[in-house]
Amino acid sequence: MNIRPVIEYLQGLQVQTCKALEAADGEARFIEDAWQRAEGGGGITCMLRGGQVFEQAGVGFSHVFGEQLPPSASQLRPELAGARFQATGLSTVIHPLNPYVPTVHCNVRFFMASRDGQDPVWWFGGGFDLTPYYGFHEDAVDWHRTARKACDAIDASLYPVFKKNCDEYFFIRHRSEARGIGGLFFDDYNSGEFEQDFRLLKSVGEHFLEAYLPIVERRRDHPFGDRERRFQLYRRGRYVEFNLVYDRGTLFGLQSGGRTESILMSLPPQVHFDYDWHPEPGSPEEALYKEFLPARDWLAS
Amino acid sequence: MNIRPVIEYLQGLQVQTCKALEAADGEARFIEDAWQRAEGGGGITCMLRGGQVFEQAGVGFSHVFGEQLPPSASQLRPELAGARFQATGLSTVIHPLNPYVPTVHCNVRFFMASRDGQDPVWWFGGGFDLTPYYGFHEDAVDWHRTARKACDAIDASLYPVFKKNCDEYFFIRHRSEARGIGGLFFDDYNSGEFEQDFRLLKSVGEHFLEAYLPIVERRRDHPFGDRERRFQLYRRGRYVEFNLVYDRGTLFGLQSGGRTESILMSLPPQVHFDYDWHPEPGSPEEALYKEFLPARDWLAS
C-alpha cells in the first residue's frame, strides 16, 4: 500500500467540502492556513466564520510523520508504541448558527507504522456523527439511512458494527450521556485488502455532506429566539467536555505536536456552562435527552 | 493522624469563604447543594451566580472514600494504586464579571490511603493561583507577597518550592503558555509531622482571600467595554482547556465518580473560542502574554 493516493484523495475532498459548504451558506467564505510540523509534515486548515448558516465551519487536512508513534495512536496496538509512523486525515466540524440545525463532525484518516525489518502495519479510521440541539425524528432516520448507504456500498455487515462503535465512542462517561445521535465510527480498520478499505474511506467521505446538507436545508430557516440559542450554547459545553476529556484525535494531535489552533478548531465559537441546569419536564429540550440521546436503532422498521 | 479535624476545618473554611465573598459582592447570595457519592462520601457545593462583582463563584467541599484509589490520585505513588482511600478537600473558583478583576482558584486537600496490614499513608495538597486578563504589576507583587507570607508562617524554605511547583503545574503544554501568574502549589506533602502540615494547610486556606480580596477591591470599578469583555471570554477558553485536559483534581473527580456538576463548577459561565486569534502588537492584551504569563520571580528586589 501507498499513502500518496490517500493524501491526494483527502486533499481533493477538502476542496470539495469547502466549496459545498460555501454554497450552502451562501455568504461566508473559507480562509486557508497552511502549517508545518517541526517533527515532519503539516497541513492545511480551512475556516469559515460568521456565516448566515454556519457560525463556524472548520475543514482540516493533515499529513504528519515521525520516528515515534504517540501513545494515543498506539492504545489499540501497544506493540507499535514508538514505531516510525505516517498519518493523514481530514476532519470537518460545523457549528451552525440556528439551534435547529445540528452540529456535525466527520473524520477520515489513514495510519501507517513500521519497525525496522518488519512489514508496515496500516489501518483506516473514520466516520461521521450528528449532534442536534433540538431533535427531529425524520432527520435522525435520514442521517442513519445515508450512513448505512455509505457502508452498504462496500459491505452490508459494516453499518451495524460502525453504528455501535459510534454510540460507544461518542459517549460522555462522566455524564452517562451520548454526545449526539451517532452515525458511523471505525478505527484500526484493515480487512487485508487496501483497495477495498480505501473505497470504504471514500464512501464515508462522500456520503457525509449527502447526509448533512438536506438536514441543513430543512432546518436553516426555522425561527428561533433566546431560549433556543441559550440551550444551544449550553449544549455546546458538552461538545467541549467530550473533545477535551475523551477525544483520541484531539489527544493525538496535542501529544504529537500538531498545530494547536488546527486541532482545537473543533471547539464551538461561543459556549455557556451553566451549573446544574436541567430542562423543564415535557419541554423540547428535555425531549433531546429522553428521545434522541439514548442510543437506539433509528432504522428499525 | 485523623481526618476528622481536617474535615471540620474545611467545612468551617467553606462557610467563612462564602460569607466573605457575599460581603465582597454586596448583592448575590450563594445557594447550597449537598450531594452523596454512591461509593462513599459526598459533599456540599456552594454556588453564587450573577453577582455585581462575581459572575460566578463556586466553593465546593467534598469528603469521599472508597476501596480503590483512582489512577489520577496514585500517579505519584504507583504502589498505592487500588488502595483503600479517604480524600477531603475544599475548592474555590471565582470568575468575576469585570475583566480587570482576575479569575482565581484555591484548593486545599488531604488524602489518606492504606493497604491491609500496612500503616496508612497520608499527604496534604493545595495552593492558590491567579489568572488575570489584564495584568497589573502591583497586583502580581501583592499576590505573591501574601502567598509567601502564607508559607513563611510555617517554614521560610517553602515559598520558592511551592511557587515553582505552581508555575510548572498550571502550564498549558499544547500552548506553551502559563494559565496565569501562579502562586502556590503543593501535592503529596508529608513532612512527617501531621500537626505542622495541617498548620500549613490552614495557613494557605486563610491567606487566600487575604491575597485576593484587595485586588478585587482595587479593580472592581475599573471601566471596561466590549473589547475587554471579549478578551476575557476568549482567555477563559484557556481555563477550560487547562481544566479539562490537564487538571489532576478534575480528572480525579471525574474518574472517582464524584458529582460532575460540582467538579465542573470550575468552568467559566461564558466562553469564546476564537480560531487563531492574536493580540495587537503593543496592546494591553499582548502585555498579558509578554509580561505576565511567562514565569518570573515577582518578589525579586
Image (spheres, coloured by chain):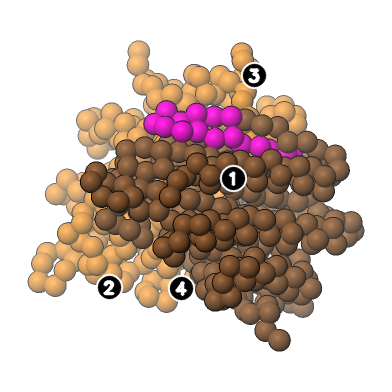
Chain colours: A brown, B orange
Q: Is residue B253 above or below residue B84?
A: above
Q: Mark 1, mark 3: which one is toward the viewer?
A: 1
Q: Amino acid at mark 2?
A: Glu
Q: Amino acid at mark 3?
A: Glu
Task: Check disc 1 and report its element: helix, strand or loop.
Answer: helix
Q: Mark 4, mark 3: which one is toward the viewer?
A: 3
Task: Check disc 3 and report its element: helix, strand or loop.
Answer: loop
Give the spatial CA distance, label 4 vs label 3.
Answer: 48 Å
| Residue B280: numbered disc | 3
Give the spatial CA distance, label 2 vs label 1.
Answer: 49 Å
Chain on which label 3 sits:
B
Q: Mark 2, mark 1: which one is toward the viewer?
A: 1
Give the spatial CA distance, label 1 vs label 3.
Answer: 35 Å
Q: Which residue is mark 2?
A: B67
Q: Which residue is mark 4?
A: B36
Q: Which residue is mark 1?
A: A10
Q: Please give the range of residues in magenta.
A: A34-49
Q: Amino acid at mark 4?
A: Gln
State the predominant SS element of the stretch in magenta.
strand
Q: Amino acid at mark 1?
A: Leu
Give the spatial CA distance, label 4 vs label 1.
Answer: 50 Å
Q: Is residue A141 above or below residue B181?
A: below
User: Quick check: B290 left or right of A237?
Assistant: left
In-front residue for pair B17/B272: B272
Q: Quadrant of residue A299?
A: bottom right
